[in-house]
Image (tube, helix red, strand yellow):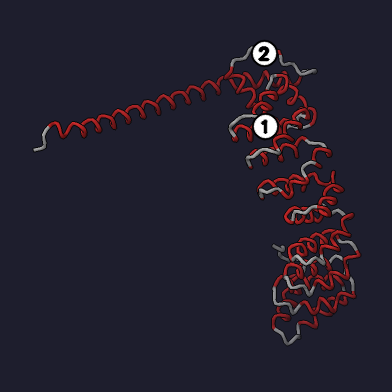
Amino acid sequence: MAPAVALEPLRNGVLALAAAIILLALFLLVERSAAALSSSRRSRREPILSRLLFQALQSSPVDAGAFRRLGRFDRRLVRSILLGLALDLRGDSGDAIATLYRDLGFVKRDLAGLRSWRASRRANAAADLGLIHSAETVPGLLSALQDADVRVRQAAVWAIGQVGTPATLTGLVHLLGDRSLMVAHRVQEVLAERGREIADSILRYAETTSSRSGRLAAVELIGWLRITTGADLLLSGMRDLDPEVRVKSVKAAAAVGDPRFLEIFHSRLEDVRWEVRCQAAKGLSLFGAVASVPRLAAALRDHHWWVRFYAATALAEIGPAGEEALSSALHDPEPLVQEMARYLLERGDAVPALP
């Protein structure tokens, strides 16, 4: 039998473990109780505060007097309600929300949050300022674009997209080449919505940037936004040695549809990249030029399905001459050519989307 002295460390360890379990259980109980109390209080106070907010927002000018003496819990709840309303309301209602949010000191609080040592706090502050659509927050959000944390820069880009003027949006364009792809993609998303306001700046950036990823993103935007003044840039890009630049440029050109693209689309049907050949065939469907028939008929022999498909689609768009080429392809000795001609003639307008 082991001596009692030898069992003493084991007994102490068991007691310490038991004490830790009891303390953890007490902590969880207190936390759950606090959460339940907070939820109960919120359910009681939210309807009252919502009515006060509705009255304040309906008054002209907006009256924040009823909220001056609220406690900390109620202020947090008011702020949460205002942010929720800001998600859905625009126009005069949105302006009233922004005014009340500012008058209650929440804008100042969020601007201070942009300088917090915690990145999550800075990111949340930037996102909240974007919801409020207050022009006075723009300088702080522009500073947040230099933040070391990717989450903060993403949130600041989105917020500027919500509240920024064309002059402010211009400051986002260079971030198309940001070192973080997540930030660059967020900028592209924002400019895809509002980029028409600064089309010249996007075009200028695409022409002058040394960032390959930034140039590719800008060329994509030219196509998405159908910036017709970018035709010369796209003509140059379709001849670029970089295959990715050619892909993006031909795709953008197919969206823009400038008549000057006809001949280069013909030549790009022989590009080494199937994506380029595919987009060139797709672009030719916009023109319906009889001169394209021989080249598109040859593209029906392409080894890639999507190229054959869009070549056949373009032939169908040309009219009688194109339809005659498709009918002739039904008797081609190559089974793939027959298959594609038959596929398109049977499906008609019911065509799948290009990936």
> Count of labels shown?
2
Which quadrant would residue 106 be assigned to in this image?
top right
Nearer to us in this view, 36 or 153: 153
Q: Residues within 10 Å of mark 2 (few under 14, many from 20)?
A: few
Outermost residue toward the left in this view: 1
- According to the image, label 1 marks what residue? 128
Give the mark nearest the N terminus, 1 or 2.
2
Q: Position of residue 139 (x, y in %)?
A: 76, 31
Q: Quadrant of residue 124?
A: top right
Which of the 4 quarters of the picture holds residue 33?
A: top left
The answer to which of 27 and 150 lies nearer the viewer is 150
How far, Cα to Cα, is label 1 from label 2? 21 Å
- Seen in the picture, residue 262 relative to 43 is either above or below; the reply is below
The single residue placed furthest to the front in the displayed view is 210
Residue visible at 72% across and 34% down? Answer: 143
Q: Quadrant of the C terminus?
A: bottom right
Q: Does any portion of residue 117 appear in the rendered image?
A: yes
- Where residue 294 appears, as percent x and y from the top left, is 85, 79
Q: Position of residue 288 (x, y in %)?
A: 88, 69
Residue situated in front as seen by the camera: 50 or 188: 188
Given the image, on which type of amino acid does mark 2 rest? Answer: Arg
Left or right of 331, for residue 82: left
On screen, residue 267 versus residue 11, left or right, reads: right
Q: Quadrant of the N terminus?
A: top left
Q: Residue at 71%, 13% (x, y): give it.
A: 65
Q: Residue furthest bottom?
A: 333
Above-or-below relation of 41 to 233? above
**Would residue 33 be found to the left or right of residue 10 on screen?**
right
Mark 1 element type: helix
Residue designated by label 2: 68
Q: Residue at x 74, y 29 (%)?
A: 137
